[in-house]
Amino acid sequence: MKISIDQLRYLIEEILDSHGFSAPHRDAVVQNLMTAQIADCQSHGVWRVLELIKNLEKGMLNPTAVPKITNSTEAIIRIDCQMTSAQYGHAIGLPLLIQKTKNAGISLLAINHSIHFSALWVELEILAKAGLVGIAMTTSHSWVAPFGGSGPLLGTNPLAFAWPRSNIDRPYIFDFATSAVARGEIQLYAREGKMLPDNLAIDKDGNPTNNPLEALKGSMLTFGSYKGTAISTMIELLAGPLIDDLTSQESQLMAKKGATLPYGGELIIAIDPKKILGDAYKDALLRAENYLNQFNKMGVRLPSERRFSARDKNLREGILSIPKSLITDLKSLKKQQA
């Protein structure tokens, strides 16, 4: 069905208000999810509110706590989200990260004890628009089998990278799970009653499956066999023990009553090309721009270009297409807590 951007935003605000979210926490979540939805990023858009409220009801989300800065040096920021959403931590930490990076040249933001449930590209686009290069990663729950394994040990462990471009509204950004597909995609297949493509998952007995419900009970697979497993393991270490937070396996064990949204950490690294390059900055970024333009000349669509085009169209029209069943489910959340 068709719904205006403003109507959808207001609906999500009403839902979170009715569940006791503080205004700053609500605004951080709404901004993140609406940014994804407007870009037609369905798997990380407003449907995530359904899982967010489930986590809240199972005691795995604090709607009123305030993230605290626990460490702040010249180039390091650590924020304890106190079981609020990672997005609330971003709202507090990203402005500081940008400031520190422009001073130091490179800095990192460690988000601790958070509930992470959306895309990484949203926060990295903020860095790219500030002229910074960004890298982000986070663990999840142990839903993914390592290459050659028959059961879950790794998280979906997304990795994202952003590079600023001459058009600040269209940076080069990729954001992908190290699993063969994002878990949200499998959940959407299950929601829509569709079968999965091959080579995405195994059932609880370690057998290949195309049934999304069996996949959710079993394990997902990494992309690129052992290469995806290695990258995913790196993320477990960098966004887990390095920042004194949980691995995906530990997060799974911490989950109360089967709460599905991960509790743990996120690592964001920001780099200022101007600080590194000095007088060579303009020439170096022009070379990078010319290089990226070659992909388009070859007919290759760069990552995020589809999202940018969808966002431009949706913002121009002010209207989004959302499944009617999803709108019904969202409205029911508000009614239950009214």
Image (cartoon, rainbow, N blue to C red):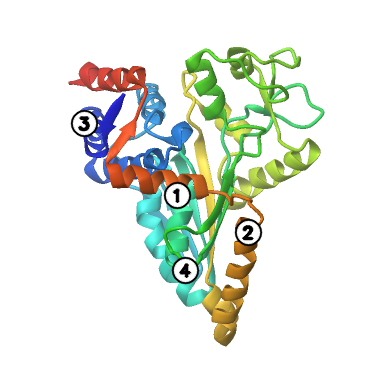
Q: Which residue is mark 2?
A: 297
Graded by Cα atoms within 10 Å as few (under 14), some (14 to 19) or many (20 or more), the crowding at tag 4 reads many
Front disc: 3 or 2: 2
Q: Secondary structure at mark 3?
A: helix
User: Is 301 positioned to the left or the right of 58 in the image?
Assistant: right
Nearer to me, 321 or 196: 321
Q: Are marks 3 and 1 in contact (CB under 8 Å)?
A: no
Residue under numbered circle 1: 308
Local secondary structure at mark 4: loop
- Give the mark, 4 or 1, whose residue is nearer the N terminus: 4
Q: Spatial distance from mark 2 to mark 4, Cα to Cα?
A: 25 Å
For the residue carrying disc 3, how many other residues have a C-alpha within 10 Å: few (<14), some (14-19), or many (20+)? some
Dot 4 and dot 1 residues touching (CB under 8 Å) = no
Give the residue drawn at x 73%, y 24%: 199
Q: Does any portion of residue 120 appear in the rendered image?
A: no
Which residue is denoted by mark 3 in the rendering? 14
Q: Is residue 54 above or below residue 35?
A: above
**In the image, what residue type sits under mark 1?**
Phe
Residue 270 x %, y %: 53, 63
SS for tag 1? Answer: helix
The mark lying in front, picked from 1 and 2, is: 2
Residues at discs 3 and 2 in contact (Cβ within 8 Å): no
* Mark 2 vs 4, N-terminal side: 4
User: What is the C-alpha distance between the residues marked 1 and 2?
Assistant: 18 Å
- The Cα atoms of the two marked residues, 3 and 1, are separated by 28 Å
* Mark 2: few/some/many CA within 10 Å (<14, 14-19, 20+): few
Q: Which residue is mark 4?
A: 131
Q: What distance separates the C-alpha of mark 3 from that of mark 4?
A: 35 Å
Q: Residues within 10 Å of mark 1 (few under 14, many from 20)?
A: some
Residue 213 seen anywhere in this rendered image of the structure: yes
Q: Image quadrant for the N terminus? A: top left
